[in-house]
Image (cartoon, helix red, strand yellow):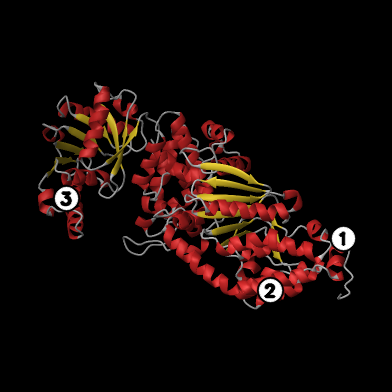
Amino acid sequence: MKVLVIGAGTMGTSIAQVCAQSGCQVALVDISEEQLEKARGKITWSLEKLFEKGRVSEKPEEVLGRITFSTDVASAGEGVEVAVEAVVEETEVKRRVFRELERACPPGALLATNTSTIPISEIAAALGEKGRLVGIHFFNPPTLIKAVEVIRGKETSDKAFRQACEFSRKIGMEVIPVEKEVPGFIVNRINLRYFLEALRLVEEGVKPEEVDAAARYRLGMPMGPCEVMDFSGLDVLLAVFREMRGRGISVSFPSFLEEMVREGKTGMKAGEGFYRYSGKYGRATVPKEGMYRVNPVRLLAPAVNEACWLIRESVADRDTIDRAMRFTMNYPKGLLLYADEYGLDSILGILEERKRETGLEEYEPEPLLREMVDAGKMGKKGRGGFYSWTYEKVEFGPVIYEKRHDHAFLTLNRPDKLNALNEDMWTGLDRALRKAEGDPEVRAVVVTGRGRAFCAGDDIAVMGSWENFSEGRYFFEKIAGPLLETLMELEKPVISLVNGYAFGGGFELNLLFDIVVASERSEFSVPEGLIGAFPPIASTVGLALLGKRMIRYCLTCERMSPREASELGLVDLVVSHDQLEAVGGEFVAKISASSPLSIRAVKRAQGAVKDIIASALRAGVHEIIELIPTEDFREGMRAFVEKRKPRWKGK
């Protein structure tokens, strides 16, 4: 196959190289002999590097031998089957090129433009046979990014579209079919929203490395958005924003972007953009410490909204969009798969919040997204989303059990009582955990509370109703005991999302969970001493796991902030309240990526340690039972109900 490439700039040079590597005879044409010599040098250097690394088997000179360099379109066009234009992104320049190509190339030759933003039909207006023209949008660098968008213009023939797809596959490219021409096609439209949100976060005072840390370490992206913008060139990005806005797309970008471009801070090529660079291929330093400053759902939400528009307008379907982002931007998973995992209700909520805050029309939620959420299609959270998921909902008294495909999500649901632990809560939580343990598809369990509390501890009304030693003993041995045994023996990891108060028993349950994530609004305490009771788990398991400092809080009943609880060792991570559920899902994903047998081995080894301290826990439970018939215990219960200070007698 003979291929003609017009334009020996960065893209044209790389396209010519890719075609030659695939066995095509290539004519690379440019108006400048000097530019052609530069192109020859770049191709030679690139082929030598690829050969050294074993990425191509042919010797560089053999591949280079299939490329001719010329300034004469007429002679270069003889016998070509495909002509690809890769000149500057100006409509009139491209039209002039295609008028010349139509004369120079055989009648059956495919004519393709590498435009990234201009509608195909605008360029095709210069042709006598408009159906010959199709868009083949390569991504920089084509030698590494093995995917192209093949764009059907308004008048592109089925034959030309099919030829373009076949040619693209022949040169080793993954084909992303774009069935309808729209400015920016698929990838650039989605990138537009993703990059704009990153820019707005920086405008709000978030550091670029914090934005990038969220993308890199939580979404798993190979580069953060600020890194990608620096790599692409901020001047190029600004030009794309202006071009898209000029074509009627709602684009509002921060003024500091124009200031950076005026100051020459255009990114990696200038040595400075969002980051400073040393050397031609310097990399930015993105520390992990800032990864929880930004909610990654905020970065994704505008991009997902744009994807919904593309689906609604029949530009592309779900699978095409997700393949496009994986193959061109190296997403570890599809954009719409991310949306399902984080929850379409979360995506919608952020868009609505941003619309209220900014008034920008670009945040107006797409009807498709709103319709899905209204129908209960929220992704893994229920009834599917863009993809199908296994979902089940069961209520064990005040404990709501949701199977969200690969994990169980348990909600303590007595918000009017601050999710206090009555008999139904103890037994319901035990039954829910046992159900999760018995389901081989469930890889982890997430527990949280509804309302402003995680769990405010044992229900005082229940404790105050015990009239004798036997009733209290029955409660701890037959009601609370089974849950504690289940937690000690459970082979599925438990992730706690502490959304508010975690007092008394609510605090102590977290000692038996594996990962504890706390909202900035949360608060912790073991205040049992203030009501004449005693924290049996905190005084034993807490001492063994967290050390001597735990005893201070058992003795003083002091409240602690989530940061203090983190310093103590109870809390693994403190995040903003709006990120709590998202972080829980991220931990589930990390656990699910590991071998089930490896996870089970960790839990069994952990269980062996718990067995060592089980006797201490039993002693602690015995102590609380011994307190039940005392005068101080009854006085503590009465004082709490009567909202007064207790009068202790030590009896």
- Between the C-alphas of marks 1 and 3, the distance is 86 Å
What amino acid type is highlighted by mark number 2?
Ala
Give the total number of marks visible in the rendering: 3
- Secondary structure under tag 1 reads loop
Q: Earlier in the sequence, mark 1 or mark 3?
A: 3
Mark before the other along the chain sequence, 2 or 1: 2
Residue 568 lies in quadrant: bottom right
Give the number of the disc on residue 40: 3
Q: Please name whichever residue, 639 or 143, is drawn nearer the observer in this view of the structure.
A: 639
Return the residue at label 2: 619
**Residue carrying label 1:** 643
Badge nearest the viewer, 2 or 1: 2
**Residue 605 at what x, y percent from top left?**
49, 69
**What is the distance, in whole Å, between disc 2 and disc 1 at their CAs?**
31 Å
The N terminus is located in which quarter? top left
Give the x, y percent position of residue 300: 49, 46
- Name the residue type under label 3: Arg
Q: Nearer the viewer, mark 1 or mark 3?
A: 1
